[in-house]
Image (cartoon, rainbow, N blue to C red):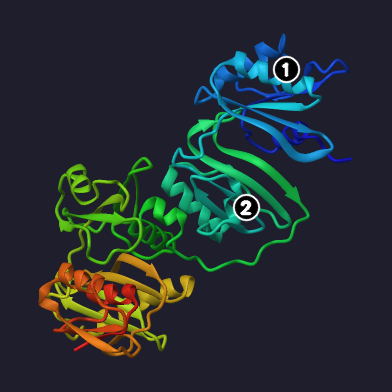
Amino acid sequence: MALHKDEILDNLAGRGNVAQFVAFAPDSNCRPQQTFCRVKGQKPNQQFRDVLSAIQALLNRSADGKINVRSYLPEDPRSREFIYALTTAENAYSAVERLSAEGLHTIVNETVDINDGGVSGVVQGDVIEFSPDDTPRCVEKPGVLSMPFGLGMSLLEKVYGFRPDLSAKSGERTEFSIHPIARGWKGTHTLLWEHEENVDSPVEQPIKWPNNFSRHLGDKAFGLLLADELGAPVPTTLVVPRKLAPFSFGSATGVEEVWTRTCPVEPQPGLFTTVKGWIDPFALMANEDPNSSEIASLLRQDAVSAEWSGAAITNNEGEVVIEGVAGEGDKLMLGLDKPVVVPNNIVRDVELLHSKLSSELGPVRLEWVHDGTQAWCVQLHVGGTQTSGSIVVPGEADDWSQVHAEQGLAAIRRSLDELPEGFGILVHGDVGVTSHIADLLRKKGVPARLV
């Protein structure tokens, strides 16, 4: 016999934390009678004096001071009427009485805000999938982040400052949500919503971004966090997001200087500020992203004593292309400095760094700084390129528009935005295929060559 929804919640509470709830079943006179409950500070299935006092106790302990009323028929797995975010016990009580009079079972539970900066998702087998600003059903939508369970748990612990109360086991599937503010009858940060056994384990998928979680943190922050989790040397980085409390990761470089880096939602090569030193983060974000829609966070990153700096990409033959300059590489990335011959020992260390990350993620693109001892990863993106030699984006064009590297990124960006249909673009100047100019050409996707 299938369990009722309130019985399922009662069983799930034996596995972990659940959203606080009180359940009612209609008696022979269609009056609500309490069945199961989990209310913070009360013993499991505490029997309250009456329906109203049970609902009031639940409301008093709700983190947001709001409760929902869900109704259903035991023989019908689909829920019936659902009333969201009530703020008084009297209104919830009236709804329970009315629905019980119709012969419906009801569950009153605390309202859990899905837009609180946390994530929801599913653990199935050894795979964890999750997304912010959504319910566990997010796994049925595009943009969900999928990764091995152990890696995902470590990443979530770095971001939120606590390890989620989740476990992975072959043949089991658990729906969950994670919240910055403690919730549920146990008052922890992880809520369980459903649990199944005897399910197939999914096939592990490659880690891809942009995804909804990388947009949540900011693209650079997500890439660096992942590089750090995979064991690459990453300078100590403090992330100051819009939607989350600040968090940090990485290793000390021994340099008492910092870089301030804007962290857009998705890659925008060279569009927003990166500057050595600390500047007012609030003024910077207000000036460059007044609508709070393009920059997800700001990064304070330890500087590296730069003997050599540059970038590495995977070209269309699957080979690693490494470019660099002596000293700091910010002008190289902007196309203002041309790449030079990089010493063999530096190339070797960058190749090892690239290989370490690509063995886990597939083809990658990264920016690096070498301090004379090791290569540090200061930016990471996943995916190969179509670039081959001076051909940044292959293809033929009806005609070609000419730009010059010394015009700067902003002018080249405008030229690309105004490019007529069917045109390709030729960039004149000593520009590297790993520069932000080349990234911008690849992002546009039209035929592009360096002259």
Q: Amino acid at mark 2?
A: Val
- At a point 35% along the width and 89% down the height, the residue shown is 395
Q: Is residue 374 left or right of residue 186?
A: left
Mark 1, mark 2: which one is toward the viewer? 1
Instruction: Reply above or below: 217 against 54.
Output: below
Circle 2 residue: 123
Q: Is residue 36 left or right of residue 273?
A: right
Q: Earlier in the sequence, mark 1 or mark 2?
A: 1
Which of the 4 image quarters holds residue 273? bottom left
Q: Position of residue 322 (x, y in %)?
A: 28, 81
In depth, the one of 143 and 60 nearer the eye is 143
Of the pair 401 and 199, the residue shown nearer to us: 401
The secondary element bearing badge 2 is classed as strand
Q: Report whether 399 appears left or right of 320.
A: left
Say which residue appears at 37% left-offset and 68% top-offset. 381
Query: Callout 1: few (<14), some (14-19), or many (20+) C-alpha neighbours within 10 Å?
Result: some
| Residue 28 in sight in this render | yes
The reply to whether residue 435 is in sight is no
Q: Residue at x 73, y 26 (%)?
A: 106
Q: Is residue 362 left or right of residue 49?
A: left
Q: Position of residue 245 (x, y in %)?
A: 36, 40
Residue that label 1 marks: 97
In the picture as drawn, the residue positioned furthest to the top comes out as 49
Task: Say which quadrant the C terminus sits in.
Answer: bottom left
Of helix, strand and loop, which one carries label 1?
helix
Q: Amino acid at mark 1?
A: Glu
In which quadrant will I find the N terminus? top right
Quarter-of-image position of residue 70: top right
Mark 2, residues whose alpha carbon is within 10 Å: few (<14), some, or many (≥20)?
Answer: many
Question: Is residue 235 depicted above or below 246 in this figure?
Answer: below
Residue pushed farthest left? 406
